[in-house]
Amino acid sequence: MKNTTALLLLMIWLLLIAILLPFAIRTPKLFTYSDTPFLSNNIQSVRANNILNHYFNISNTDYLYVIINSSSYDKALQEIYSNIYLLNNATVITPDEYLSLLKAQYLNYLGLANNVSNFSRFLDILYLNISKLKLYLISHFQYFEYQLNITFGLPLHNFSSNSCPVYKVNFEKFNGSILEKARYAGYLTFKDPFLFYFGFNNYTNYTLAFNFLLHFSNYSAIVYKLLNVTNTTPIHDNEKYNLSIISNSSFHKGNLWLFIVKVPSNESLVSINRFTEGLKDSYIVGHLAYYAQSAYYTQKDIEIIDITTIILVLILLVLLVRSIIPILVLIGSASVGLILTYGIMYIETLLGYKIYYISGLVAPPIIFGLSIDYGILFIYRYFEELANNNPTPLQLAFRNSIKGILLSGVSIIIGFSSFIISPSTLLQNIGIALVTSSLSALFPSVFLVYIMLLLISPKYLSFPRRKIPSITDIRQKYLYNFSNFAVRHNKLIVSLMLISIVALSFLFITTHTNVNIDEILPPYANSVIGTKILSQLYNYSIDYVILHGSSSSNYTLLYDLTKELIAQGNLVYGPLSVGNQLILNNTNLYRHFHEGNYTLLIVYLRYPVFSQGAINLTSSLINKGFLVGGDNAQRIDIVTNTVNTYFKYTLPLTIVLIIAYLFILLGSVFLPLRLSLTIGLSSLLGSSVVSFVFSSPYWLSPLVIFALLFSLGIDYDMFIIIRLLDEVKNHEDISIAIVKSVENTGLVVTTCGLILAGAFFSLMVADLRFLQEIGLGIGVSILFDTFIVRPVLVPAIISILKKYNFWPFKIRKFLYI
């Protein structure tokens, strides 16, 4: 009857797996890599962007900076146009178009245009006339041949022919090289700007000339030439202001050609990666490109991490358990937990949940670690009951182990739940994933393992060995010696612990973290290499600085800020400046940059987006009290808000909730406080090791180390405390009881610790540095917690507190029921 019920329950589990598996497979592709969706409306950069949209009509668009390595401009441009279809609603902005746009902006800002609308109509007519001229010359190509012969033939023959005297007059009007004089004279004579594209060495190649006209499409470049040649731009004061702050040299160096692609701010990262892969010998830079590349390389790392986790855990299980069937049961339980987690996450996305990539990345090691921890505790208790020849070993093992598993599991879930009630949107998102992972690890490791053991005869559990694995081995002797030493020298050990906490806390507080893109991208990534190249070309990112109040009341502040930013090498567009020029008392500038009692400065920082220079300068502006918008400001805000919220709100709340929960269960104040203190030491050590190895860790690394340790670290402590509650019934001296507790749980704790540490060490095979930091930090913390904190520090503290360990109440009786 029991086997029939077990088979039925197993079929239900298999059906659940079959339903969730297809969704679980799709889940990693749904990870969100951008921080933008997790910005709340109270964050300053979001408020700044709302003001920009409402008052200054600056829309939410983004730019990709595309660097093509090509022998010619036309080939480079053709390469982009051949792949632009891979993006949604993208617009290519050529260097000439960008410079023309800037020039038009300058004219608009300064009010130098006689009539901007008339100028716009003038440009439309100019484009139309050039198109008509092109078609005319194609259909009357002999006339174009005549123009070429006059323009470039007469200078070579010293004007011996009088066939075009007007040309000779125009030739003498210009200073410069013979080629420049010839082109300008030809243009003025025939009113044909296409002559600018030919010279003395190719004007007789009529096939080339005809194909050039046939395929010509770069009208913006020819308009730009016309504006420079004819000076038809409606400028009153052309020599008063320098309108060429950015030149063509910012877009071309050697064989490198830079183009700007305008995309919607919600452009698909998948589309950007396809566009990147489609381009030959090119580099894509920009904050969306960084996120897209991060998504690409993270997806590749996930596969490697998952395989490494399974292999590493399998090796450790073989070395520690040494029996195939229990190993397969444990691996099967962990795998089901992972399917449950990703399957439930997929369902959550249908309800509007966005899976932040950190949440998805830490899920596998958490699930494998917790599932196998709980499973080993259960199975080892089963082995113990079998060794004692108990008539109902499985039921008794389940009854005795479920207390520790549930006590630990619920405390972990409570710890992770503090994220969900955090004011930080990003921490809420991570919290949902962590709670989902811990719940998904808990149920299979208890109930599925129980069902499988119910169906497997005990005689098969030892295969290939003859006997069932022993619940004791040489590790217990070492653990006994360690804990016994700790009890005898408890005051010295606790003093060293307190000194270590103070020293490591100081080191942690003074540790400098970073937000560098090379933390989320491997050094060989396309965007990383492109960023280095971009620094030699157009090397700007944009901050939008907003001041509340009238420009007159803020005049001194505006003047000092503008002057300081320009002196640092930035370009500033605002009521007192255009580019790198201070322009005072210009009513047009004031009118353009002041709206709704807000004054705007558009600052072109002399650093690429997300670079350390851009982040430092933007941070400085925010710290001075200015409202700052743009990609750099959003990046800073998400980091500052998340870190401050975690360490000032979420972490204290986690500690309070865990202490309250354990106080209710254990009736003790000091046991939960001691637990928090020792986990804090392990977390500080892990973070310090990361800082020592990597110098300046990624901003998320210390946060993740603390977040996971203050939940996962409860496991082993609870295993020991549950055993202690049993041992105090047999030993009046609590020092003896804690030594026996460490000895009897030592095999389980060390096995679980090694496996959980191994699961997180698997992150170090990733190419992304911040994953390596998290793997190293958590792995080291868990090993320290397993081999130093539990067998040494815990006995030392408990032996000092003695009867006060369970103050103010006696041991709760229901823990024995």
Image (tube, helix red, strand yellow):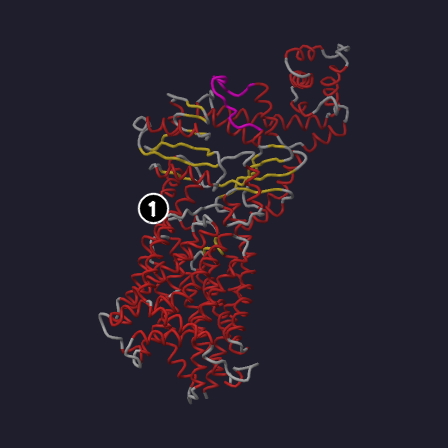
Q: Going by the picture, which residue comes out furthest to the left?
A: 808
Does the magenta-highlighted stretch encompass residue 245?
yes
Residue 385 covered by magenta stretch: no
Question: Residue at 55% across / 69% down in the picture?
Answer: 315
Quarter holding the C terminus is bottom left
Check the image and report above or below for 32 versus 613.
below
Stretch of the chain drawn in magenta: 231-248
Q: Is residue 779 above or below residue 207?
A: below
Residue 663 as seen in the image, left or right of residue 184: left
Tell me where residue 582 appears, x and y as whole percent: 42, 23
Q: Amino acid at mark 1?
A: Asn
Report the magenta stretch's main SS. Answer: loop
Q: Residue at x 55, y 37 (%)?
A: 534
* Nearest to the observer: residue 668 or residue 350: 668
| Nearer to us in this view, 136 or 404 | 404
- Residue 542 at x, y percent in the picture: 46, 36
Q: Nearer the viewer, residue 564 or 344?
A: 564
Q: Which residue is mark 1?
A: 42
Determine crowd level at label 1: few under 14, some 14-19, many 20+ residues with C-alpha closer than 10 A.
Answer: few
Give residue 643's position: percent from left, percent from top: 37, 50
Residue situated in front as seen by the camera: 378 or 228: 378
Q: Quadrant of residue 552?
A: top left
Q: Quadrant of residue 713?
A: bottom left
